Image (cartoon, rainbow, N blue to C red):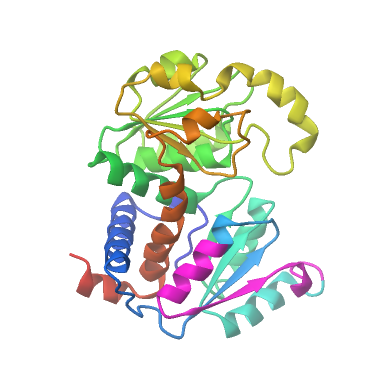
């Protein structure tokens, strides 16, 4: 059974196929065509964390594909009222796909381990593969062929950065993390990336002005993620010189695009002038969450349709 807990579970060719399917479906939607590719299929959204983009994009995307969705919050008792095995196998009797948004990655791994139903990681503390798919779809739309494109992530080496670094390695893109000492990406994760993609062009630098000098895309995220609220004051001090502002954007090439996975704390990690600028792809990037996830769901549940319809 195919799951997508991390992008390590798919190949670069798989990613390219998913992206091509996503773009195909997006173009058809723009033309007013909503093919019922997943007619009468059901996705369950099993969420431990609050969500806007992930929930709405999956629910709307599944509806556009002819299927239905079911939101499952704390009331279903995941991990509380019955054994994980019973819970998951019963869920597998009812739905075709589960999107799991969990506080800890091992919760998603446990869910998938029973192979009762395909599981998509809708965000965990380790990684955010759906976001990474939307990110590179956005870059491809703005800048064309992804090979060799340089993505610079300015800020914390968090779950979003880790998935983005991996997908860049998979697609022969360059990735730079500009962060203060102590906020690098997880060493174990990066060892896995290096082992799977030994030619990956990934680096960490301290000076964001140096990092963005050759950037095709500059990416940032909040300095304090969910669950880290107690560290917010320390993090604001640590990242004070890592704000994406007009001065930083001026140090990058004129064609550079601006990305942020949202929600943003305007005036902290990014300024209004930058996020609302002509260089910003932030809103289209958010919209591409739905398109990328539509491509992913079709790839998981109806690959025959892709073979027949996506050239």
Q: Specify whether 18 is left or right of 157.
A: left
Q: Residue at x 32, y 68 (%)?
A: 29
Q: Quadrant of residue 236?
A: top right
Q: Position of residue 174 (x, y in %)?
A: 34, 30
Q: Going by the image, does 118 lie left or right of 194? A: right
Q: Is residue 65 above or below residue 271?
A: below
Residue 193 in the magenta stretch? The answer is no
Position of 101 relative to 142 (above/below):
below
Between 203 and 244, the one lying in front of the other is 244
Q: Depth check: give the residue in front, 214 or 31.
A: 31
- 69 or 89: which is nearer to us? 69
Q: Which quadrant would the C terminus be assigned to in this image?
A: bottom left
The vertical placement of 207 against 278, above or below, is above
Residue reaching furthest to the left: 311
Where residue 10 sits: x, y (%)? 39, 55
Query: Could you tell me how many numbered marks the image carries?
Result: 0
Q: Could you tell me which residue is drawn at 37 percent across and 20 percent down?
A: 252
State the image coordinates of residue 199 (x, y, percent, origin top left). 32, 31
- Whether residue 149 is visible here, answered yes or no, is yes
- Residue 72 is inside the magenta segment: yes
Question: At x 34% / y 75%, what residue is drawn?
Answer: 34
Residue under the point 56% across and 80% down: 95
Magenta extent: 56-80
Is any atom of residue 1 visible in this view? no
Instruction: Give how far across and how far down residue 227 sits, in percent.
Output: 74, 43
Name the side, left or right, on which 75 lies relative to 152.
right
Which quadrant of the figure has residue 54? Answer: bottom right
């Amino acid at each position: 059974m195919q799951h997508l807990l991390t992008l390590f579970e798919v190949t670069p060719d798989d990613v390219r196929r998913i992206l091509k399917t996503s773009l195909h479906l997006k173009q058809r939607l723009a033309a007013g065509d909503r093919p019922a590719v997943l007619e009468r299929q059901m996705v369950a959204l099993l969420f431990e964390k609050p969500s806007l983009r992930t929930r709405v994009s999956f629910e709307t995307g599944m509806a556009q594909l002819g299927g239905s969705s079911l939101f499952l919050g704390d009331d279903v008792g995941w991990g509380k009222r019955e054994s994980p095995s019973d819970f998951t196998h019963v869920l597998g009797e009812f739905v075709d796909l589960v999107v799991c948004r969990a506080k800890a990655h091992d919760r998603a791994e446990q869910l998938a381990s029973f192979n009762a139903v395909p599981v998509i990681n809708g965000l965990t503390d380790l990684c955010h593969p759906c976001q990474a798919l939307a990110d590179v779809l956005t870059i491809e739309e703005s800048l064309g062929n992804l090979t060799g494109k340089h993505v610079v992530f300015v800020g914390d080496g968090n779950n979003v950065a880790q998935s983005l670094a991996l997908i860049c390695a998979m697609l022969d893109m360059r990735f730079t993390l500009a962060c203060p000492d102590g906020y690098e990406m997880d060493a174990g994760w990066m060892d896995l990336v290096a082992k799977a993609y030994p030619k990956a062009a990934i680096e960490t630098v301290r000076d964001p002005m140096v990092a963005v000098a050759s950037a095709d895309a500059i990416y940032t995220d909040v300095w304090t993620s969910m669950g880290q609220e107690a560290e917010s004051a320390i993090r604001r001090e640590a990242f004070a010189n890592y704000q994406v502002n007009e001065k930083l954007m001026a140090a990058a090439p004129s064609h550079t695009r601006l990305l942020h996975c949202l929600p943003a704390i305007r005036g902290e990690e990014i300024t209004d002038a930058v996020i609302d600028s002509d260089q910003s792809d932030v809103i289209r990037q958010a919209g591409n969450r739905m398109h990328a996830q539509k491509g992913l769901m079709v790839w998981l549940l109806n690959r025959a349709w892709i073979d027949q319809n996506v050239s």
